[in-house]
Amino acid sequence: MTTKSAAAAARATVYGHPRQGSGRELKKAIEGYWKGRVTADALRTTAAELRRTHWRQLAGAGVHEVPTGDFSYYDHVLDTTVMVGAIPARHREAVAADALDGYFAMARGTQDVAPLEMTKWFDTNYHYLVPELGPDTVFTADSTQQVAELKEALALGLTARPVLVGPVTYLLLAKPAPGVAADFDPLTLLDRLLPVYAEVLADLRAAGAAWVQLDEPALVQDRTPADLNAAARAYRDLGALADRPKLLVASYFDRLGDALPVLAKAPVEGLALDFTGPAAANLDGLAAVGGLSGKRLVAGVVDGRNIWVNDLEKSLTTLGTLLGLADRVDVSASCSLLHVPLDAAAEKDVDPQILRWLSFAKQKTAEITTLARGLSQGTDAIAGELAANRAALASRAASPITRNPAVRARAEAVTGADSRRSRPYAERAAAQRAHLGLPLLPTTTIGSFPQTGELRAARADLRAGRIDTAGYEERIRAEIQEVVSYQEKAGVDVLVHGEPERNDMVQYFAEQLDGYLATRHGWVQSYGTRYVRPPILAGDISRPEPMTVRWTSYAQSLTAKPVKGMLTGPVTMLAWSFVRDDQPLGETARQVALALRDEVADLEAAGTSVIQVDEPALRETLPLRAADRPAYLDWATEAFRLATGGVRPDTQIHTHMCYAEFGDVVQAIDDLDADVISLEAARSHMQVARELAAHGYPREAGPGVWDIHSPRVPSAEEAADLLRTGLEAIPAERLWVNPDCGLKTRGWPETRASLENLVAAARTVREELSGA
């Protein structure tokens, strides 16, 4: 094992930290600011206090070099857009009038101005704001935020390293601005962007930065020779700057592949690489290029995206091998800790046996510092930590919680016939049209209606014992009555019950499935002020009893119109949870699919004619490397069909996807064999409708005409225009009218106005089609 003399210089660091605070103070302050209850100065004070708290906690835990610039009011890619001055023309006036309000306008939009498009950050559930660029884009440096946060950390006496989105990744994440030709390549702007990065680097050096980290996760994807040449040119030019800090180029989420020799040869002082999961291949890649002579290596050996304790001895072995491949090896997580909750010790309701298996941001920081100490001082220095770690790993491996023989036997007995509908789509469509009797361009919503303060208070009252179950259910019953009545009055064709009883589309089901574990405080940022508590897949999955039938049936009893049963699909149940790392994902997906299959059967038996099984994470979970995608798509689409394949031909199966790039998975969408799919399309101006048409997608689709992640209310004419655009790609007999996503985060006034405009738009376009 490593000796003290072999690695005396090993230090601990992280790339980023959760932003929200232990009580989600940032979310509350920002939302208070939006509502006028919190001043801008108070918001800035809260943010500064959170940053100081995070840095001090990291330093106190033994982190030698804390990150700055990872904090954000909304999104770090949007912060980069501000840093390089790439403000869209429609937002410049607002930004000039008030920088903070203009920033939030870019993120959320206003009644008059649309926001930036939002999509998933690689294969995570974090969302970023997509930069809009064109041949006329002029970049200008604004390092105000980055310099200010660096100075805050230095004033505390800390060693700090600013973290920036790298220039190549920034351009590869960008899209052509509205009105710019669709084939415009933002990467052609690299030579225009690099001088701006040079200016920011000089500002950070002047402010006291010894090192700056430039994140280039886009380089772990399949990249063209032109992309790789751009990366080589970018770091050749930045490396040649005379007035700059030392540069640490970071990648994560997967292996670098062909980009590794490019970065290894670049004139920068260090690389930060992921060595977990598929990125473990970076170890062989480093050896193949002859190591990093003269460079610093920051080794991401602690999984920054999952919550299981690290195998310390395995990580030490990896670190020991890396010592021979770089001049200096430091220890980190595989990526920013933004993707995990803050502190597992806060989970007082978790079985202590299971709690010892869990590692959130605080525990991961301790693992990182332990590994750095072991690498520098030898294993004797961390003997106690190693013994406790071995015991935790052994406890999990031997626990009966992780294995249910009946579940495994059922999954092994699945045949191909179980994942096929009994009739082809054309026959099913005819049966469904006859059974449902829907008009042309049928209207519906995605599932959830506003989660009001009263609903959240009712759940809190139930947990605290202030009301009993009967009192809580009476409130839920009244909410469902209101939602159903409103939809009927508004003229919606296929109704939903509004999901007032649900806290989250994954957590609600996880709390009712054996094998899942829910947390109380495990909040993780999804976008902006939207935080979720991903449940934990701790064991084999089964459904003890029906989960949704009661409330769906109640809603159906209130109306003659069809009410959709609403379920979350198996891939999304995995993607928005912390998954097992002790068996293949496909095996876990099959277990979840079988549990959902039972729920679908019970809904159908109770008279539900339309059942929606949401899979918004199908694209999100797509592996970053093309070579890994076929195997994933095989088990992902099979799991959906297994969950839905047992219904009658006249039962209509819907699915839903949102906020992702769908072009890469159009064939997979087809392979799901759903009767109707609804998709996000408003911010991307119906791009997905064109992608479906180009593929020859044969079934029904509802590309969204209302962007629900913005508070603005689209007019009836705006929604009608989007419908007309959709009709250019999808025939009217196969086109549905719906919002982009669920309405949980919206308020009732904007929901009523927007939904009524949506229904009015559908009526207008129906009349146009009929010639009336």
Image (cartoon, rainbow, N blue to C red):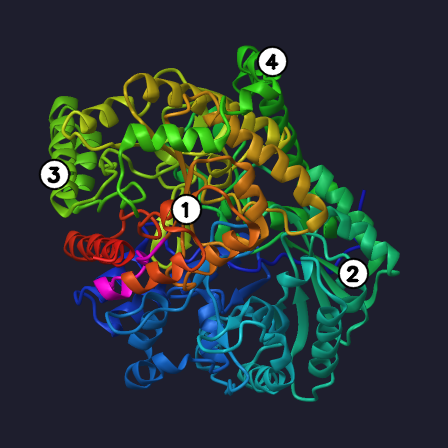
Q: Is residue 114 left or right of residue 647?
A: left
Give how far across and how far down residue 344 sits, in percent: 45, 39
**Most common secondary structure along the magenta stretch:** loop
Disc 4 + disc 3, Cβ < 8 Å: no
**In which quadrant of the rendered image does the N terminus lie?**
top right
Question: Which numbered circle lies on residue 701?
Answer: 1
- Label 1 neighbourhood size at 10 Å, few (<14), some (14-19), many (20+)? many
Residue 87 belongs to the span the image colors magenta: no
Residue 707 belongs to the span the image colors magenta: yes
Residue at mark 4 to residue at mark 3: CA–CA distance: 44 Å
Tag nearer the camera, 4 or 3: 3
Q: Earlier in the sequence, mark 4 or mark 2?
A: 2
Q: Residue at x 75, y 63 (%)?
A: 259
Label 2 sits on what residue type?
Answer: Asp
Foreground pick, 646 / 347: 646
Write the start and end of the magenta stretch as one range: 704-719
The residue identified by callout 4 is 413
Give how far across and how far down residue 99 sits, in percent: 33, 80
Label 3 sits on what residue type?
Answer: Ser
In the figure, residue 634 lies in which quadrant?
top right
Residue at mark 1 to residue at mark 3: CA–CA distance: 26 Å
Q: Earlier in the sequence, mark 1 or mark 3?
A: 3
Q: Secondary structure at mark 4?
A: loop
Give how far across and how far down residue 321 sits, in percent: 82, 49
Tag nearer the camera, 1 or 2: 1
Q: Earlier in the sequence, mark 1 or mark 2?
A: 2
Residue at mark 1 to residue at mark 4: CA–CA distance: 33 Å
Q: Secondary structure at mark 2?
A: loop
